[in-house]
Image (tube, helix red, strand yellow):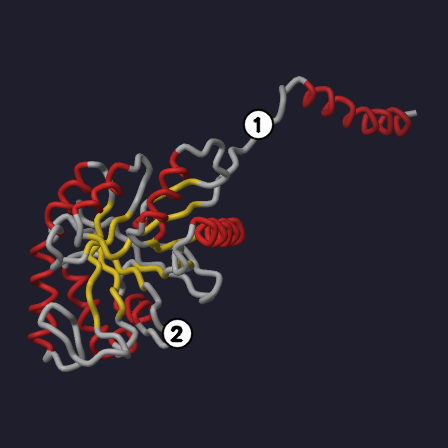
Amino acid sequence: MLQFIAILTVLHLPLVAAKENSNAGPPVETPQVKPRIAIVIDDLGHHASNTAFTELDYPLTLAIMPFSAKAEELATQASEAGHEVMIHMPMQPESMPAQAQEVLDLEDTKAQFLATLSAAFSRLPQAQGLNNHQGSLMTAQALQMEWLMDALKQRQMYFLDSRTSAATVAEATARQVGIPSNRRHVFLDNAPSLEAIAERWRRVELIAENQGYAIVIGHPYPTTLQFLQELAVKQGRPYELVYFSELLCLPDASSKTSNSYCWHPVD
């Protein structure tokens, strides 16, 4: 008899638990995290018309040529508008010989190299980081990239590898030195028609969907500005637009590496 009662008790327990769970209310839904996309606009500072990019009302990272005519004015406007400022540092490409003092090139001594960098930092004190303008030759040089990353580390600045060459060692050097960094995934407007830009943007969205984020670089073309203005009024975007500095410590699906170095750039 006691065994029969025990069996009934055991059989009854799941029913009691189910009843208690039914009174717990509806399950709490976990908020869905949207993929994140950082838009960087390169080659800024040569024309007054570049200020139109500062008027876009979502996060943008504006990469300004430090020695351009409108650099300081544009950096001030961008910062006041709440956008992130980056130094778009001219570096020697494979297709050109050594250039002016305002370009990092292979003929520079270390002192000359660092003096050019120091001048760029002084011109754009709002900058939180730096990426390369051209530089297919320079970014493949391990020694010069160490000089660059050491200078950035001293100022607690980040680095974006624009990846103008498959031979770049810039991002790898940044990670070795301990610089918050990441890489460009897509150039938005190599073909600057609206149709081509829209097609490239679909590529950006796909990368963001697959790995959780994407970094795209555009340029100050009228069609790029028009596309970004239309993006501003697009409703129900399935992704979040963020500053580049918000994507500094994430793994990159193509490199299979993870950047564990992370500090917040100086305000």
Q: Quadrant of the N terminus?
A: top right
The image shows residue 133 at horizontal and vertical percentages of 25, 64
On the image, the x and y values in percent for residue 189 come to 39, 56
Question: Residue 184's image quarter?
Answer: bottom left
Residue identified by numbered label 1: 28
Label 1 neighbour load within 10 Å: few <14, some 14-19, many 20+: few
Q: Which residue is drawn at the image coordinates 62% and 19% (left, top)?
A: 25
N-terminal of the pair, mark 1 or mark 2, is 1
Query: Is 245 above or below relative to 79?
Result: below
Task: Identify whether 258 is placed above or below 47.
Answer: below
Task: Measuring from the top left, give residue 103's x and y in whole percent.
Answer: 15, 70
Which secondary structure lies at badge 2?
Answer: loop
User: Could one spot residue 212 in this view of the protein?
Assistant: no
Depth order, front residue of 50/151: 50
Total marks shown come to 2
Residue at image coords 36%, 48%: 223
Question: Which amino acid type is shown beneath numbered disc 1?
Answer: Val
**Kind of residue sitting beneath label 2:** Ala
Q: Is residue 240 visible?
A: yes
Read off the residue under disc 2: 166
Q: Which quadrant holds the C terminus?
A: top left
Binning the other alpha carbons within 10 Å of mark 2 as few (below 14), some (14 to 19) or many (20 upward) gives few
Residue at image location 28% in from the left, 79% down from the top: 94
